[in-house]
Structures are given as structure tokens and as C-alpha cells.
């Protein structure tokens, strides 16, 4: 059960942590990856998900005996640890194989300099995978080049609209925990300041394709009921689905002193992980807990004598998970760009990371109305009103660990009166937008 691939592998993939050149995935290395440069690095994914070699695929199809997929030669050469033991680990073979395949495919797309070579490599890999599944009782995962390279485009109407308002937002990462403290800051304290609304956003992945529309939360020890805003594919953590929720918490924000620390406690069950472990450590990945919680963000909208522009909140983001290029078109009532040339733009997102654990490789780019505002500099695109070379998907709400949650606010320039375009380019990381706020002035 050996896979050798001469590709440049994305180093912060969910299932791999190898560097570049000839990457070899070999069960005999235990839980490690040997790169062609002689380095051996511990993998984040326990070695239960492995490919058979290309030669074995064509001549010796895997057989299923006692719940184990293997060939006779594999057992003799690698021993039982080199095969997938479905009963022992309760892992779906198709899901495992699909995750590993996507990691390799996205690495090829992200780093190869020759597009034709990329297509040829993927087509060959897909052909091999289809050969593996041929004449077996495993349902095909439907691999295709298109499934890896799709560009996401979504138009979104605002869920909330306010006049003469502004906002602040802050969040906390909650992976492998069920509680966190959100440090809300930035609301001006004046006699005219009033709180218009306070919204708590949260996101998690679980093993349910559909979950309840109501979700109970403790917000500063008060029971609140969150309602579902979106369902998404799981962002590459081998779970069934991903879900976003929002709770109305206005009555629990102190009007006289709103800039406080707010405690959030999310539901848990006997199988919920509260270990606080590194999300990329093998122990926190297998077996899967009941849910993998991403994080929570508190958004507070206020009004005073200095707020004069419209404010829009967008959170109906069904099927918004992306791993390559994504466009989000924020629709708003036509406005005059003469008085409102600028805005505060806030994004809330799940599953961002600055690399792999403590390895820093984040590379996502953010564009607002075709101007770059975040990420490694793109010389072909004009810079925005403000620009940072850091990524909006760096998991900074949970630095240094456990990452996986982002709340970022930028000053941006409004270019169009009725729609604002948000564009993201991901280098292969799976990301889930949870909410956008557009606060014009």
C-alpha cells in the first residue's frame, strides 16, 4: 500500500504534512511521511487511508476479507498495519480515499507551473482511482477534474438592514472545546450611543446531513436559541456536513458598558471533544467526535451622533464552502457613491488556518470590488484603500492554537452602487464563510 507522487504538495493539507518533490506515503513509516529531500515529518492523519501502488491496481485489484481491503502481496509485504481495518477504526473507505486524493489533487493545481501537466496528472490519478473501485461493492466517489477546480459564485441578499449605524465584531475559536470568551471592544461610549442589535454567530461540523433549525446556547449564563443560517459541505475534516447558526443576544449586552468579555457555552454530548488538543494531532482527528466546533463571533450594531450610513448583514450562505476561487456578490439597495464612498467590511469565517499547526504557510488572497485588501501581494491587481499582506483566513481568533476561526474588519472603497464583490483565492484549504457585514460611511 504505497503511493509515490512527483508533485509539489501543499504543506498544510488536512491529511498530509509533507514538503515537496517525491512524496512517499508508506505504512511502514508508521505515522510519518518521507519527502524526496530526505525529511520525515509526522503526518496529521493516522495511516489508515492509503492507496495501493499503480502497478498493483491494474494487475491485482483489492479484495475484501473480514472487513479489510487488501491484496495478498500487500499483506505479505506490509503486514496488517498497512491496510484499512474498517471494523476496528469505523472509517468509511470512500471518505478516507477521497480526502487523501483531494489533498494531492489540490496540491497539483496550486503549485504546478504547467496547466496541461496538471490536467494530465489528475486524469491519470482519476483513472487509477476508478480502476480501484471497478468491480467492487464500494460506491464510487465520482472523482473528476471539475470537482476539484470549480469556481464558486454566490449572490446574497442582506438578512439585516440598518440606517445610520455602525458595528464592531470579535470572535473566539472553539475547536476541541465547548466554551470560549469573546472580548468585545470598540463601541464608542457616549450619551447618544444605542445598541440596535447583537448577533452571535457560530459554526460546527458533525456527522448529520441535516440538523435542527434551533440550537441552544448559553450566552453569559443565559439560555438563547440560535437559528440555522446555512448548511455546507464539511471543510475537509471527514465529517458529514457543516452548519452555521445565529442567535439574537441584544438583551444580554450591557447598553451602558457593552465593551465586555462575553462567555459562550455550546451544546455537548458524551462524545464531544473537550481535550483542547492540537486539531492537526492524530488523536484529535480519529475517531471523529460528535461534532467539530469551529468558533463563535459576536457582532454588535450601534447608532450614535457620528453614524450616518446604511449597514447590511449577510448570513444566508448555503453551500458556500470553497477551496479554490470564490466570488460573493453582496447585493444592497442602490446607494449614491458620492456620500458613501467607503465602508467597514467584516468577514466571519470557519476553518481558516495560518498553516499546519505551528508551520506558517497561509496564502489566501482577499479582494473587495476587484482591489486586493489582504493576502500575499498580487501585482496584477490594484491595492485597496487599506492592504495587509496577512490572510483573512489565518485562524487568528484562535492563535497560536487551535486556530480555525476568523473575524476580520477592513476599511474598503465602494465602487458600485448596488453590489459589492468579495473575491477569495484559496491555495487548496477548505474554507466556510459564515457572515459578511458591510457598514458604509
Image (spheres, rainbow, N blue to C red):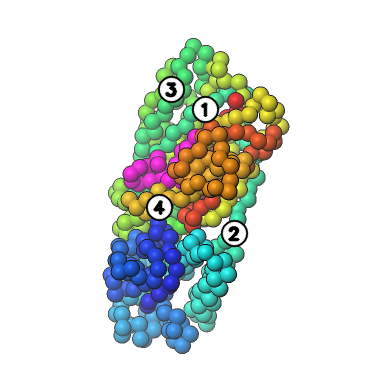
198 magenta-colored:
no
Percent x, y of residue 175: 37, 47
The residue most toward the bottom is: 59
Give the labeled residue for mark 4.
361
Q: Magenta residues, as a range?
A: 393-409
Left or right: 311, with 22 as reference point: right
Q: Position of residue 394 (x, y in %)?
A: 43, 46
Closer to us: mark 1 or mark 4?
4
**Dot 4 crowding, Cα within 10 Å, few <14, some 14–19, many 20+:** some
For marks 4 and 3, the one nearer the N-term is 3
Please indicate, yes or no, whether residue 179 appears anywhere in the rendered image.
Answer: yes
Q: Taking the image as drawn, is residue 14 in sight?
A: no
Q: Which numbered circle lies on residue 150?
A: 2
User: At x 55% / y 73%, what residue is drawn?
Assistant: 120
Q: CA distance from mark 3 to mark 2?
A: 43 Å
Which residue is the site of mark 1? 167
Amino acid at each position: 500500500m504505497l503511493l509515490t507522487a512527483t508533485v509539489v504538495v501543499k504543506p498544510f493539507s488536512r491529511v498530509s504534512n509533507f514538503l515537496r518533490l517525491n512524496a512517499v506515503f508508506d505504512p511502514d513509516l508508521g505515522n510519518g511521511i518521507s519527502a524526496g529531500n530526505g525529511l520525515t515529518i509526522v503526518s496529521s492523519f493516522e495511516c489508515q487511508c492509503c492507496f495501493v501502488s499503480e502497478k498493483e491496481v491494474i494487475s491485482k485489484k483489492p479484495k475484501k476479507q473480514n472487513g479489510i481491503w487488501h491484496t495478498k502481496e500487500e499483506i505479505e509485504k506490509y503486514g496488517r498495519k498497512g491496510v484499512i481495518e474498517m471494523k476496528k477504526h469505523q472509517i468509511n473507505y470512500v471518505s478516507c480515499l477521497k480526502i487523501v486524493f483531494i489533498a494531492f489533487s489540490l496540491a497539483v493545481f496550486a503549485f504546478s507551473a504547467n496547466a496541461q501537466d496538471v490536467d494530465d496528472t489528475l486524469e491519470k490519478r482519476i483513472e487509477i482511482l476508478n480502476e480501484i473501485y471497478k468491480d467492487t461493492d464500494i460506491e464510487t466517489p465520482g472523482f473528476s477534474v471539475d470537482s476539484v477546480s470549480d469556481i464558486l459564485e454566490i449572490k446574497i441578499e442582506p438578512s439585516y438592514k440598518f440606517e445610520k449605524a455602525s458595528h464592531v465584531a470579535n470572535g473566539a475559536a472553539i475547536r476541541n472545546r465547548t466554551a470560549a470568551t469573546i472580548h468585545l471592544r470598540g463601541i464608542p461610549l457616549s450619551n447618544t450611543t444605542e445598541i440596535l442589535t447583537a448577533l452571535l454567530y457560530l459554526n460546527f461540523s458533525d456527522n448529520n446531513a441535516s440538523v435542527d433549525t434551533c440550537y441552544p446556547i448559553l450566552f453569559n449564563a443565559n439560555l438563547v436559541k440560535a437559528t440555522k443560517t446555512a448548511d455546507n459541505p464539511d471543510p475537509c475534516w471527514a465529517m458529514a456536513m457543516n452548519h452555521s447558526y445565529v442567535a439574537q443576544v441584544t438583551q444580554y449586552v450591557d447598553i451602558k458598558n457593552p465593551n465586555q468579555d462575553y462567555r459562550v457555552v455550546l451544546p455537548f454530548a458524551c462524545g464531544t471533544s473537550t481535550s483542547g488538543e492540537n486539531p492537526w494531532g492524530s488523536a484529535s482527528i480519529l475517531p471523529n467526535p460528535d461534532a467539530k466546533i469551529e468558533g463563535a463571533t459576536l457582532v454588535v450594531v450601534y447608532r450614535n451622533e457620528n453614524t450616518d450610513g446604511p449597514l447590511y448583514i449577510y448570513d444566508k450562505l448555503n453551500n458556500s464552502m470553497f477551496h479554490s476561487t470564490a466570488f460573493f456578490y453582496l447585493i444592497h439597495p442602490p446607494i449614491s457613491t458620492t456620500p458613501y464612498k467607503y465602508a467597514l467590511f467584516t468577514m466571519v469565517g470557519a476553518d481558516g488556518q495560518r498553516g499546519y499547526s505551528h508551520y506558517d504557510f497561509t496564502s489566501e488572497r482577499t479582494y473587495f470590488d476587484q482591489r486586493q485588501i489582504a493576502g500575499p501581494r498580487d501585482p496584477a491587481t490594484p491595492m485597496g484603500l487599506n492592504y495587509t499582506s496577512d490572510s483573512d483566513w489565518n485562524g487568528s481568533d484562535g492563535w497560536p492554537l487551535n486556530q480555525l476561526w476568523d473575524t476580520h474588519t477592513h476599511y474598503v472603497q465602494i465602487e458600485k452602487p448596488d453590489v459589492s464583490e468579495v473575491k477569495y483565492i484559496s491555495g487548496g484549504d477548505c474554507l466556510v464563510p459564515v457572515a459578511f457585514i458591510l457598514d458604509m460611511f
